[in-house]
Image (tube, rainbow, N blue to C red):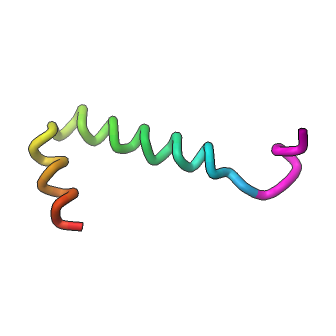
Amino acid sequence: MHGHHSPGGGFQGGVILGASFILFLLTHGLEEAKTRMSEM
């Protein structure tokens, strides 16, 4: 087990991305999130 000694961070990056999406949904609502995602 050497995850804390080597580069990486895919799990942590996924958690941060997921949490930011959830926070966006909570603050702006589902319709705004759908609008923003369709623009990408």
Q: Find residue 15 and report its horizontal and vertical position in percent.
A: 52, 40
Report the side of 6 relative to 14 (left or right): right
Residue name at image x 12 percent, y 47 percent: 32
The percent position of residue 13, horizontal first and vertical second, equals 56, 49
Residue 9 is covered by the magenta coloring: no
Q: Is residue 23 left or right of residue 26?
A: right
Percent x, y of residue 11: 62, 44
Total numbered labels: 0
**Quadrant where the C terminus is found in the figure:** bottom left
Q: What's the magenta region?
A: 1-7
Residue at left offset 18%, top offset 57%: 36
Q: Quadrant of residue 27?
A: top left
Query: Is residue 8 left or right of 23 when viewed as pictured?
Result: right
Q: Quick one: 28 or 10, which is closer to the camera?
A: 10
Q: Main secondary structure of the magenta part?
A: loop
Question: Picture quarter containing residue 37?
Answer: bottom left
Q: Quadrant of the N terminus?
A: top right
Residue pictured at 85% horizontal, 54% vertical: 6
Asked if the stretch drawn in magenta spans residue 2, the answer is: yes
Name the residue located 39 percent from the left edge and 43 percent from the top edge.
20
Q: Furthest-top residue in view?
A: 26
